[in-house]
Each structure stands twice: as C-alpha cells, then as structure tokens.
Image (cartoon, rainbow, N blue to C red):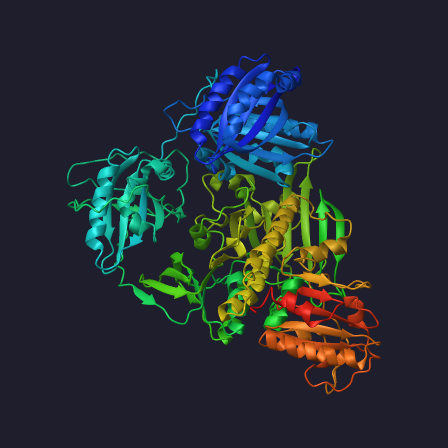
Amino acid sequence: MTAATEKAPVVRTLLRMRTREGCEAEFEQSWRRAAAEISKVPGNLRQELVRDADDPRTFLITSDWVDRAAVDAFGRSSAREALTEALRELREDASRSTYELLHTVDGGQPAEDDAPPHVRIDISTRVEEGQEEAFEAAYAKTTAALHGTPGLIREELLKEIGAPRYHIFAEWESEQDFITWVDDPSHADQSAALIRWLSVEFNRQHYEIRHRPADPGGGSAEPTTRPHVRIDISTRVDEGEEEAFEAAYAKTTAALRGTPGLIREELLKEIGAPRYHIFAEWESEQDFITWVDDPSHADQSAALIRWLSVEFSRQHFEIRYRPVDADGGSWPLPAAAAGSPDPKPVVAAAPVPAPRVSAPVEQVPVPSAPVQEFVEVPGAQHAAAPVPVPAPPRTVSGDVEVLVAGAGPAGLTHALELARRGIAVRVVDKRAQAATQADKAIGIHCRTMEIWEDQGIVAEAMDAGIWLHGQTVFVNGKQTHQVDWAGLDELPYAHLGLPQYDTERLLTAKLLAHGVAVERGVELVGFSQDDDGVTAQLRLPSGVSETTRAQYLVGCDGAHSVVRAGLGLDFEGGVSMFPQLFMLGDVDVDWEMPPGHLVRWVRIEEDGAFTGMLVCVPLKGRNRYRIATLAPEPLQKTIGSGVVPPGFWQEYTPPTLADIQAAIDDVGPAGTTASNLRWSSIFRVKHGIVDRYREGRVFVAGDAAHLHPPAGGQGMNTGIQDAWNLGWKLALAVRGLAAPGLLDSYDAERRPAGKAIVDRAVAIAFTDEMDMEDEKAQFLLEMQMTMNYAGSPLVGEVTDGEGFAGGPQPGHRAPDVQGLRRFGVAHDLRLFDLTRGTHATLLLHAGAGAGEEDLAALEKLAASVRQSTQGQVHPYLIAAPDATVPPLVDLPVVRDTQGGFAAAYGVPGTGTAAYLVRPDGHVGLRTRVVTDAVLREHLSGVFAG
C-alpha cells in the first residue's frame, strides 16, 4: 500500500457524464482522443474511463493530478475548452467532484483486451469530523486483511474535498467475484474494522471499465475451479404450437454452436403437460450470465422469443454426478475447491432481451438427446432420485379478484383486509405446513396491536403473548440504561411479545372465519399482466401446473420473492449485508432480570469496534428467552464460508446449547447458565429496499419489498403496515370506487416509511440502541406510533385564520379518545369505537358557539358525503359538553363530555371543524372550513367521482 499522505497528496477529479442516446461509442472515441492530449498537460498522471454497469449511457472520467494547482491550472486553460468540446456535444448532463488521493493498494493486473472488462466498486460512507484518523487507520487495517482475496485487483481510498465523505474504490476482475466475497461470511474479520461506519450508512455503485491506458505492475488472481452448472429454462407452449417450437429450438441450437462456456444442451417436454424445458450445461454460471447480459445474443435466441417473451422461468443447478455416456462422449467435471460448501440454487425470472430481427421459423429436424444424467439442486444429498411425472395442468378462472402470494404476517394481513370488504381473494403459500416452532420476529408493536383490535384478534394475541414493557442495556458489563413503559396512558396497548408462528396462527384463523383458507404447498412460479388483470402460473402440491387469473397480484412472498424477481425490481443502492454470522436460540436462562424487559449486552472496544452482543427477548414461560448473538468464532470458521442466503439456514446443523452457552459466557453476566434449548438457527442479515412497490397491477409488500436487520421486529411490523395500507385502497379499486391515483399512493406512502425504518434499524444495529435523548419519543418511534404519511399527495389541511391548537396533523395517526357518550348507551365510548371497521370516518366537531343553522348544515353535509362515497364514509357529530344540539336525523351525535376529543384533536371551543380519518386510522384531511366544496375536493382524490 502506498500512502499518498507521505508527500503532497495526489488529486483526483471525477467527471460523471450521461451521453445522448445512441452516442455511447462516439463518446468513447472522443474521450480517447481528448485523453491522449490531456496526458501531455503538465501535472497529469493518469486517466481512466468507466461505464456504469447498470446504465450504459453513464460514464465516469477519472483523472489523477500531481496536486490541486495542476488541476486548477488546467481548468483555467484554453486547452481545456478545446479538448472537452467534443465530449460536451455528446452529453445530456454532467457533474464533477475533486478528491485528495489518500491510499492506493495494488494487487493484480488489469484485464487483457480480449477478456471481459473488469469492474469498479465504489463504496462511500460518511465520516464525522474528528473520526477521520480512526477511519483511515481502520481502512489501512482492512486492506492488509484483504490481501490475496480472489478477484480483487487493487483498491484505493478517496475523500471528498471539503466534505465528510470517503470513497473506497476497488477494482475486481468481475462483479461476480465481488458479490461472492460479499456473500461469504468468512470475510467478516477482514472488514470488521470498518463496520462501525459502514453499518450506519453507505452507498454502493458498480461500474464497468471500458478502457484504460497501460498500467504497470501486479499479477492476476488465480481462477478457482468450480463444478459445471445446468441452466433449466422452461416455458409454456400451447397446443398446436409444439412442432413450431421444436423447430425454433433446433434453429437456436445451431446458432449457439461455439458459444464460449456452453458445453451442450437438450430439449425436454413434460409428459402430459404443455411445458418445455431447455436443459443447458455451462462451464460456469458466470459464463451463462455473461451470455445473457450480452445483447448480441438476441439474434441467436430470436426464434424462441415468441414463447419466452410471454412467460418463462429459470433455475440453476450444480451437476454432482454423471454416468458415462453411451456414445462415448465425455466432459470431465472439475472438482470443487477444497473446503468450499455446496452452492445454493439461484432462481431468476429475468426477461430475455428482445431480438432485433424476427426471423421466420425454419423446419429443421430435432436431434435426439439420449444422455441420462443425475442432476440435483445444490445442497441436496448426492443420491439419484426418481423424476416425478407431472399430471396434466389445469386452468382456473372466474371469481378470483386478488391473488396473494405468501402467507406470512404481511400476506395474511392483506388477505384479511380484502376478505373483510367482501373481495374474492386467494392466498397461496409454497410452504406445505404452517410454521410451528421458529420464533423469528417476536415483538408486536403498539401500532400493530391497534390494527389487531380493528381486525378482531387483539384479545387472542394478549392471551397467547407476554407484555414487553421495558428494556435494560449493559455496555461492557455495566448497566447504562433501564426504561419501563408500563402504564403509558396515551397508548391503547403496550408492546407485546408473541412468536411469529403464533401471529400467523391467529391471522390464519381469522381469515378462515371470513371464508378464505390458505392454500399450502402451492407455489407461484411465474406471472404476466395486461390491462385487465394478471395471469399467474402455480405449481400445486401434486406437481400439477395451474394457470389462474386475477385482477391484481400482491407479492408477500418474502426475502426470495418470485414477484419481486418477476417485476425486475432492484434494491435501491443494492442489497447490503452485515458481514457477521448470527445465531438464535430459544432457551431458559437462570438469571434475575426485570420481568417483561428486553435485555441487551454489548461489548465495544476502546477504539469503538463492536465485538460482541447478546439480545434477549422474553418469551411466555418462566425465565424463557429468545437469544440473538454473534456466532462463536469456531462455528463461524466451520460453516461460515461460501454464498449465504438471507434468512434462516435450513441446510446446516443448528447451533447447540453449548454454542449458546459460549456466547453468554463471552458477553453476558458471569455465572449464567442456559438450558432447555427448544430451537436454534444460524442466519445472515441482509438489508435493503426496492426501488418501487408497484408495477401496473402487481404489488410487493413485507420482506418482498424491504429487508431489515432483526431489531425489534421492525421487518414484520412494517410488512403488516404495508398490507394494512394497501388493503383498503385495493378493495376500492376492485369495486371500481377508487380515484385514478389512489393505488399510486401505496408506493408514495409506504416506500418512504419503509426506507426510514430500514435506515434507522441499520444505524442502531451495532450500538446500545439508545440513540435519542428523549427515551419516550424513541419508544413511540420504534413502536411506529409516530410513523406518518405527512408528505403524501392523499392528505391535506384547510384552515381559517384561527387554525388548530394542536392535534394530529394530516397523514399522522388519529389517536384514541376516552370518555365519549352517546344517548341510549350506559357506558363511555372510545373514539376507536367510531373509527373501527372497513370504512373511513368523518368527525364533525361542534363547539359551544355552534348555532342551529351550523348543525343543520353539518347534517346536510354528512348526507352528501355518505351518498357521494356510496357509504364508504361514516359521519359523526362530536359535540362539546355545553353545545346545544337540536334533533338530527342523518347525523349520529356523540358528546365529548370530558373534553378529551377537543384536547387531543386541537379543535376550538367555538365554531366547527372536521377530521376525515381514513380506514387505516391516519388523518386524511383536517379543516376549519367545513363546507361541501372542501370535502368533495379532498374525497375526489380517494373515491371515484
């Protein structure tokens, strides 16, 4: 490593340019000519052109200079204008940054001209003032640990001049090399020194290197030897098209002859089913991906596009055993690298690039494929299994209005909201059985408890769970925080501890009570959509293929979402992963801690490094806890290598009681003993959020849309909120009662909320989690009680000169109020008694000064609103204790006898005001100008006119 700080720092300029469409090649040539001249300018050391791997029209021009003076001199010179004029004419926009070059780490050589381009990975993070020296020292430590990493050629550390942001610029032989390293938990020790910064906030961008002048030094990382792979591409071929399809396949195979990395392939057809499989063997998965990503192969696959562009699915396999071919041919299988685990299957549903030319189908004889092989999903036992013969497919159509994929908490919540509104909903889940053991998410947030009250399952949840009403935190063995929220009056419900399998059990039972049974063992394998609906392909437990039709599809199918993949949704900034390996265990612990308290031990070194954690959540039972902790080093080294999927590992032996005990001994209180291990697992933490939640008639929610660190059940509760938000909107759309932009508000409201929750969960994951001075405000934030949609286009406010004296703002949660009275009812009412249900609620308030004419106008307004929304809005008059109210026919009257509503909602003592509370319990509109015109303008954005 060369430290640039030993002398005057080298300065690097980064110029980002986006070319006009179709000018990419001309831009590269113009840059080469300009770069050749700029290289002659005094002070210029080096130049590089990089292309964005995800946007081929975006380029990054890098120039190194001996110092800032050289950069400034060139910037003021007439030569700069002449040399950059050609580039300026080809671009749409540009931005420029200048950095000091702090460190350069050299490794291998740049790629040869005939090899695939190397890639650049730019990882940037914010470093607060005063932490620069510590960060640079941590980076130097990390680069030493990274020496010899396969595929890593070199990297360097940059800092933005005048800004607290660092960039780690790393060059890799391929993007796959980088992804392999990221997904390998054994690299945790290498990057541990930087985790205190990268776990809080970072961005990542990938580039493809298109051209580079000759660069001295280095060697190249040796390639690893891997087993060949099988790619299975399957598609539906309707009756009568089989001969044309097989002829098109034969034409395609002729065009593919000689493709680098392709060994052989064959065409299979499911017996008794209209589905074909193209089984292709490649030397490596990367060879296949390279071919797919190359647009020049469009002509090769053009004959098949008419089928593959409509619907197809893809699965990757590793070949573990093959008998000798009868015809004497052989392709030797490379042995797996020593110590490497079985790779996991990769399922994708990416579209095939469209062909440039549509050629007529040529009738060509189809060669036979007599080769018999044993092919299995990686990670399975290496024994041949009989191939099941699928039964004939079936087609289902008719009254399915919404298809929900996934029966976790988000999918069940969404289906329940639709069923409560009379929507014909179908729920499928590929799991053959409901979960009965794994704890997963435990914490039920206060806001979720309010939702469950509305849905009618809160009593059962309280009976099955345990109250989590406090938290105790220890840092380096010393207690630093202890808070208790028992008796917090403004919360209708406290924080509940309930294992996720119980959450799913309660929601499933309530859904069944509404006439909808979850179809288990039914897997969504593909879908397509048009202007009128969605066509989905399902695989039933018997192996039968089924095609079904629905107006909408909602993907609640988890971290490995088929719906997300089918829509081509990208994680904003890429999906990120903590390098550490974690483990969970459900055990009894013989300590004396405050009942109902979450207990957290963390160890933080003097240099700020986070080196240990123990998070213990009480479960129902005596001294029973769900413990989450870092996996012990021996366990990490034993199984922590290779590509690791997010979530719970089923492929490896779970941790033992001794492993859990070792973690307690390492971080927890001395003398503590764990016993009665009921369940355990190992997992990785991936986090990210997709770039959009909706594409046409298809939506994603829950883990299909966002992945969270396991902090306080944020992922599950956020998914429930997604489903709660979308449910009432989609029901209106199915009924034809939704305004044109209503469904767009799902993404506009839930995605910013999801991003804020993911970002905060990541920021506090490696801390003591007490990051706000106002502990009560932090608790309400974590319980999602203060989560709001203030920036939504669906909410608003209209005021006169006086305005509101407090109360919930538009988009915020509408709080409950006690002490309301209604004639004929002997007990007090709550405001939630009025808002509970599938409707929106119009709360019309009349103060003491409201006259008889004012109240008559409110009654007329209520009738108008009820009629214009076809009964979807229920109006109530909330009258002040001393307001004079004449007999009303079309407007139910509730007395605010204790003034609780006026205080909580900030309404004036005189005159009138109105709140429109949406079906999800958030304020849609509040207004002091209570007129038909004001209400109609707001309602026109929600309901069809």
Q: Nearer the viewer, residue 99 or 665?
A: 99
Determine whether, in the image, residue 12 is placed left or right of residue 560. right
Q: Nearer the viewer, residue 578 or 127?
A: 127
Q: Which residue shows up at 61% across the image and 52% down it? A: 752
Above or below 517: residue 883: below
Q: Position of residue 571 (x, y in %)?
A: 52, 46
Quadrant hosting residue 294? top left
Q: How many marks?
A: 0
Left or right position of 254 against 838? left
Residue 210 visible from this viewpoint = no
On screen, residue 278 above or below 394: above
Depth check, front residue: 458 or 893:
893
Q: Percent position (x, y) of residue 186? A: 51, 37
The residue at 75%/55% (across/down) is 777
Determine if residue 649 is in view: yes
Nearer to us in this view, 49 or 444: 49
Q: Quadrant of the C terminus?
A: bottom right
| Percent coordinates x, y for residue 210 in the rendering | 45, 27
Quarter of the figure with the N terminus: top right
Task: Describe residue 77's horizontal placement relative to residue 492 as left or right.
Answer: left
In the image, residue 426 sits, relative to residue 350, either above or below, namely: below
Q: Position of residue 554 (x, y in %)?
A: 48, 60
- Residue drawn 60% across the image and 45% down it: 663
